[in-house]
Image: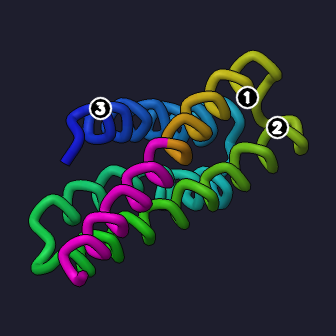
Amino acid sequence: MENILKTKSYDFAIRIVKLSQYLREEKKEYILSKQVLRSGTAVGALIREAEYGQSKSDFVNKLSISLKETNETDYWINLLKDTGYIDDKLFVSLLKDCHELLRLLIASIKTAKQGNKKTNE
């Protein structure tokens, strides 16, 4: 597993936990904060699970679920911005990190799938 993906997803999870705390404590927002917390922290947890996947297809499956969670987190970040819970500066920063994870996950999944094709030939 690429260390950059593990590191960036873990750092992203920390930011998401802090975002959720901010939303609850400062904005008194409890529903959206739980949603973004769940999806945003699942990204890294699934990447860690993939590390010890039972097979190459299990590895790809876990990364694919992580990709879905990252995309869902993108949705919540956009919704939080468009409803005024986070400002533009925080939004841009979080979205940048989220999109970087999306790109890394897509590249990792493609690489793993190509590896599967080569071993199946």
Q: Is residue 42 visible?
A: no
30 and 1: which is toward the camera: 1
User: Which residue type does callout 3 highlight?
Assistant: Ile
In the picture, measured across the screen, residue 61 lies left or right of residue 118, that is: right
Disc nearest the viewer among 1 and 3: 3
For this orientation, the residue located farthest to the top is: 89
Nearer to the camera, 107 or 45: 107
Residue at left 73%, top 55%? 75
C-alpha separation, residue under disc 3 versus residue under disc 2? 27 Å
Asked if the stretch drawn in magenta spans residue 118, the answer is yes
Left or right? Give the position of 97 relative to 118. Answer: right
**Would you place residue 37 above or below residue 121 in this image?**
above
**In the rendered view, would you say 43 is above or below 118?**
above
Stretch of the chain drawn in magenta: 104-121
Q: Label 1 to label 2, Cα distance in Å?
A: 6 Å
Disc with the residue nearer the chain's start (1 vs 3) = 3
Amino acid type, callout 1: Phe
- Secondary structure category for the residue under label 1: helix
| Pointer 1 with pointer 2, Cβ within 8 A | yes
Residue 76 numbered mark, or none: none
Residue bearing mark 2: 81
Cα–Cα gap, marks 1 and 3: 22 Å
The secondary structure that dominates the magenta segment is helix
Q: Using residue 78 as the reference point, say whether residue 65 is left or right of it.
A: left
| Residue at the farthest front position | 121
Q: Which residue is mark 1?
A: 91
Q: Position of residue 78 (x, y in %)?
A: 79, 45
Residue picked out by circle 3: 4
